[in-house]
Amino acid sequence: MAAMTYIWLGLTIICLGAIVITAVNEKIKAWVLFAATAAASLLIGCQAIKIIIKNLSYTVKVPFPYPVCFINFGIDPLSAFFICIILGSTLMSALYANGYLSSYYKQNRFIGIHLFCCAMLTLSMILVTISRDIISFLFSWELMSLSSWGAMLFENEKQEVEKAGLKYLVYMHAAFIFLAAGFFWVGTESGEWSFEALQRTWTEKPSAAWAAWTMLAAGFSIKAGIVPLHSWLPDAHPAAPSHVSGVMSGVMIKTGIYGILRTLLWIDNIPPAAGYTVLFAALISILIGVAGALAQTDIKKLLAYSSIENIGIIFAGIGCGMLGRAYGCKPLMVLGFAGAFLHTINHAIFKNLLFQGAGAVYISTHTRDMERLGGLWRIMPVTAVCFLIGSLAVIAVPPLNGLISEFCIFLALTKTTYINSLLCNTAGAFGITLLAAAGAVALVVFSKAFAITFLGNARFPSHKPETECGKPILLSMEILCLSALCIGTCPKSILWLINTPTAQLAGQDSYLELAQLSFSLCAAAKAFLIFTSVAAVFFILHYYLIKNKINTKSATWGCGYKEATARMQYTGGSFVAPFNFLIKSLMRHEQKSEQIKGFFPEHCLTEVKTFDRIDYQIISPLTALIKKIAGWFSWIQSGSTQHYIGYGLIFLVLSLLWVIIYG
Amino acid sequence: MPFLFTGIIIRVKALWSGRQGPPILQPWYDWLKLMKKGEVASTAVSLVFKVSPAIVAAASISAVLVVPLIDGKSFISFPGDFIFFVSAFAVGKYFSILSALDTGSSFEGIGASRDAVYTALVEPALMLFFFSCLIFTKNLTLGSMITSISTVKSCGMAGTVLAAIVLFIMMLIEGCRVPADDPATHLELTMIHEAMLLDNSGPNLAMMVYAASLKTMLFGILIAKVITGNIRGVSGFAYFIIIICLSAAAIGIIESLSSRFKMSHLPEFSFFMLTLSVVLCACALLFVFGGI
């Protein structure tokens, strides 16, 4: 019980911090948030780590008025794992917010309300993971949606931010409807509303339970950003300020993953069809996420689509785990779930880092459009190196942490060969090809993101930044870089975090496979170290080779052309042009160009727009249809008080008649 | 050693066209000459350009570490090292693309973007090849995986030939040989790999050239391992060397017989290779589950 006391204490500190934020001076609001988050992290984090290491679990009942009587809260290794990620990410983001918001002071903005929403976001995410009851879960879920919406609308003088906020709110409430439907379906079957009762119902009445599971999965998928329910992501992440984008992309999406994993804990017999559906949805998300990222020129929209891809990778791990449980294959099950957990941590770290880098660029240059930037490394070298390390982590190369988790998921997909089913082997082959292809395309995406923004020469000198960013921004990015490098070179540092949650999902006897995974990953880490040291040796060798020779500097080779300008560099759109076959099939691609006239043309225009095909061709017509149908009934809301009194009168008369006729 | 491979290719091309040709060790002499020179650095480049050649060379060498060379033993071997193999290539490719875009030159941008497409098609084919090997064996180390196709009783020969063809086409694409890319052209608009090296000079260029030759030879080593399979000892090693030399000669002959494909045909060529590896995987699955 003491564990839950510490957690309540930590949550109270965050609440108090949120209230204090509204009262203090503008300049120290963000520091108050950081201090409150740090204190809460110490209190709650230590308990969470203790629970993970010792494989404990606690539940507590909080009394509530009639007719609910009790609300259940609890914590077990799965919840503790997600709490660790939530606290780590929000702490770094609170540190970053100090530097980011400093450029918005003295503009009469509602910084207090914004930071209050950020604190509430942290609070609600932790509450989601410790809820063990339909009421508490739905309440914390709604609080999370509302607080993230509030935190997102910081620059709400811009119309695109308002539109993105509205879209986000609608999607989150659609998710809430799905979740409520699923939960209450099973809840009415079981009679009680605690998660233990739901677990009992699942074993007793499986058919109703699977229909409910589809609803729940749909609701959690909307939050996680699985295609085709992902359309809110690419609009919401660029609109939000970068510390909120980092938290949303790093941990808030993961609460959808947490929800799916929590429902998997209640189910004993998973049919293979469920596993194949999850794997299929994952592979589609990977494909569309990476193709969407390829087409973007806005850095943060590119990172948002990349988040969709990485959530697909996590879902692929979960799908493998579900297939393992369906077929009873231990290695597949353990590696699938372990890979999903590993990628959750790693994605939280490097996506937060990348969003913080993108935010640093936005603060310094006031634009997110990559085609207007270039050559930023000269003025912002630390930001450039941090963004480079983040990119290396995303594309899963040694010696960073992305490879650790993708390694695990590749291994999981190869274990499908252990199962004696042609469908399973084909699914594994398909999965491994698509994952490798997506990895290669992600390489192109992030070479575009880094090189067009930071390398080369500045394309539009008006967007040149003046100085490097402030210390809080750099410090938080450096800490994230160090953790990425640390996990990459020494995987044991997070393997202890995933052992007990994986055992919870895959069965308590999975420690043998986890030990084998640990062996493989540590051997891989040794290979990474060899790679890094060989590179270092070559670099030093190179230094000594050119030391006493004649070295000159000159302009870049221009094939004799002397008047090369910075605008003649390759643009992002041209760089990904060979991939247009992929972009055109998955996204909607519109190109408008003027014909070049004459031998010495003066002016020419080409405009390329890419739209999300699902958003444009499926969801927008659907919302237009809903608006049209709702428009037919708009005459009801006439605005005249007499009409409204008339409606009330008609209702009274009708109910009287009902009582008279039917008794 | 990789220079010997490149030397054989150049010699075979020369002999095919009726010339004497340079000595087989000529690439080695050229490399030594490059290492003794100074550098001309561009004013537009950053630290990324300066560290890229070291990282690209280290990536190729790390990929060699997990491949079995003598008697089925490699320097490092652990379950899942084929994933490390593919990611080592990826990191080398990433840094060569970054160094190309760092110079701010349009030529290097063209080369980088074209090269990126081929990687995107080679990586899944390579993974699918490894998956096909895994259908026949449960051992996840690269050494035992490559040799597993030839050990299959009834259709091992057919599988080996198909795998060798897939790897050969990958060698042509990743090693930047005709018909995927012409290493001898110096027209910037037609270069692919060479375009990415335009601004490298001196020891930098030497390291990039070494990395490229090593990568080409690595695929030759993979082909040799797939074909020789489990034959150990002196005869195994002899077959290994002979097949590597034969694959170099085969590249030379194909380079003499064909010209570089039109730019629009190159993605189709890569898709052809991807389709062949899909066929390989399908055959492997049908063998295990259909009982061919």
Image (cartoon, rainbow, N blue to C red):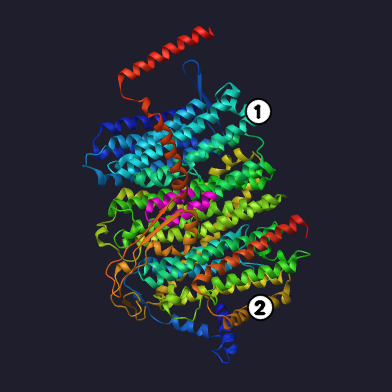
Q: CA distance from mark 2 to mark 1?
A: 65 Å
In the rendered view, tell whether residue B199 sits above or below residue A419: below
| Left or right side of A364 for A126 | right
Write down the quadrant of residue A544 in the picture.
Answer: bottom left
Q: Amino acid at mark 1?
A: Lys
The structure residue drawn at horizontal position 38% and vertical position 15%, both measured from the top left corner, is A648
Front one among A406 and A608: A608
| Residue behind mark 1 | A205
Q: Label 2: state its secondary structure.
A: helix
Note whether residue B237 is visible: yes
Instruction: Please give the chain letter of the residue carrying mark 1.
Output: A
Where is residue B90? Give x, y as percent.
Answer: 51, 63
Q: Is residue A286 magenta?
A: yes
The magenta segment is A284-308
Where does label 2 land, which residue?
A: B241
Question: For residue B118: magenta?
Answer: no
